[in-house]
Image (cartoon, rainbow, N blue to C red):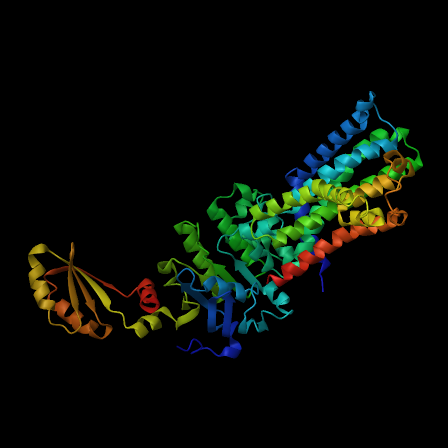
Amino acid sequence: MDATSRTRSDDAVVHARGVCRRYGPVEAVRGVDLDIRPGELFGLIGHNGAGKSTLFRMMLGLLRPDAGSLRIDGCETTAPAFRDTRRHIGYLPENVVLYDNLNAEETLRFFARLKRLERPGIGDALARVGLAHAARRPVREFSKGMRQRLGFAQALLGQPRILFLDEPTNGLDPEAIAGFYATLAQLRDQGTTVVLTSHILAEIQQRVDRLAIMASGGIRVCGSVQALREQLDLPLVFHLRVAAQDRAAVTEGLTGLAGVQLEDTPAGLRARCPRAGKMQLLARVGSLSARIQDLTLHEPSLEDVFFGFSD
Amino acid sequence: MLDPAQILTVAGKEFHDRLRNRWVLAVALVFTVFALVIAYFGAAQQGAVGFRSIHLTIASLVSLVIYLIPLIALLLGFDAIVGERERGSLDLLLSMPITRTELLLGKYAGLAAALTVSTVAGFGVVGLVLLPSLDAGATLRFAGFVFTSVLLGCSFLSIALMLSVFATDRTRASGLAIACWFFFVLVFDLLLLGGLVATSGRWGGDVFGWLLLANPTDVFRVLNIFTIDEMRSLHGLASVFPEALARPWLLVAVMISWVVVPLAVAARRFRNLA
């Protein structure tokens, strides 16, 4: 698999070649090649222990690769100059831990000073995550969701060029999750590159431009969700709602189509169909429309793609 | 190249934290109360109460400081780094444009400032109470005692940060801190005396005095007791302690090295952890 396809590596905001990292005998990351384009919303997914966190920590310069080259915004993460690059990076760790003694505004001011930001935009960052009303409240009084939002506000300080978000929607309610992804979309439109990990695949499948699936320390596959679906050639799933007295006739009518598998469900029938046979199945369904009460079509989910590639 | 602004930012936050959670106030109160009680009732065993000469007061306070300040400093600093690591906030801090050395120094400076303010405020109150009875020399002697108390605190804080960098979790770090306190405050002198007795005094003389430098609490004791002629005579140890070591500047230099060396070891280890 060529993870760099469709990406000119000299343009890449994240550019990894042959990146390896061992912990004693364990090869946590092995030979990762990856390019992430400017203004891209990129997902990094994988089982626990697949190497995501190690790769993430190397991208942030928190860990040195044992081998290979890893450049962020054109700078090697091991170079002294990477210190300045960090000013343009926003990072939200998986379990964000902030300081209970500080209030929201003081928390952001502390991180803004560490980032040496002249115009940190603390008020804007708080407003963006919906915490303007809680600016003076001590963090110890914050709920998990509010802490997560404050952590996100911290990552947004100074309008970073790259955002690294590790499980960013942990503890957020559905409304906050929607707001979070809306903010990410705005940032992407403004040219910010976003790299995120998530275990909630349904949440990111409609939102990322591309993603990489990691397994056993390497990148198993990389591309857009649609491209990965096509690459895996997973079947489409049709759910047909059929009255009990019509099931036999509908089953008979759909039998014999190449590659189509039929199953009974409490509400009717489920038909798994190769992508290439979709129109043929639809035509057959049309001829049986008098007996079919409803039809829904499911594309393979990101979860299907994930399991397809990680098995 | 270290950036002082980054060190100050971290130090300011650490100091602010200790002020806000009333740590500074609580420790200052502990010092004040203990110091006043010891200064006033220090001679109760001899059947007298009340404030005595500054030398006797300092001698009493030295015992308090030797037990209390190392313990407070170790408790203050043992989780400075390992705590951040265990809570998961270290990665966020290190993702900022700050080096590990700057972070460590910032932590140290902030905690040292909190400890210094507590110590100076706590003993300052005692100093104010004693002030009417002090002449210029005695005032200077008491100021020297407070200064060396701060140095002692800073040296144990430095050791605490070193333990915090080396320890893999807070439990181990706290165990190491307590073991460290036992060793320097209770065990070290016993070992020296044991060695002296076991070798029938052959292993003693100047070597014994120099070995005291390997323990910051002994250096502190020496600075505040053995450098005062009256106190040396009183304790009957003038003959044991080598004359070459009875120089305050040398002992202060040793105390400072007890601040610098553990911190340098911690910084080196912390950098290598990357």
Between residues A43 and B60, which one lies in front from this camera angle? B60
Between residues A101 and A59, which one lies in front from this camera angle? A59
Query: Taking A56 as reference, is A234 left or right?
Result: left
Query: Taking B77 as reference, is A54 left or right?
Result: left
Residue A291 spot, x, y in % from top left: 10, 61
Residue furthest right as drawn: B136
Give the answer, above or below, for where B160 lies relative to B50: below
Residue A38 showing in the rendered view: no
Q: Residue at x 20, y 66 (%)?
A: A272
Give the answer, above or below, for where B58 lies relative to B8: above
Between residues A219 and B247, which one lies in front from this camera angle? B247
Give the answer, above or below, for where A93 lies relative to A72: above
Hey, which quadrant is residue B56 in on the image? top right
Residue furthest top as drawn: B47
Residue B220 showing in the rendered view: yes
Give the answer, above or below, for where B96 lies relative to A234: above
Query: Taking A95 as reference, is B20 left or right?
Result: right
Hey, which quadrant is residue B72 in on the image? top right
Q: Residue at x 32, y 67 (%)?
A: A311
Residue A16 spot, x, y in % from top left: 51, 73
Q: Residue at x 41, y 64 (%)?
A: A45
Residue A227 spot, x, y in % from top left: 35, 73
Quadrant of the frame with the N terminus of chain A: bottom left
Between residues A221 and B202, which one lies in front from this camera angle? B202
Query: Taking A289 as reference, is B269 left or right?
Result: right
Q: Residue at x 69, y 57 (%)?
A: B265
Residue B77 spot, x, y in % from top left: 66, 47
Number of marks drawn: 0
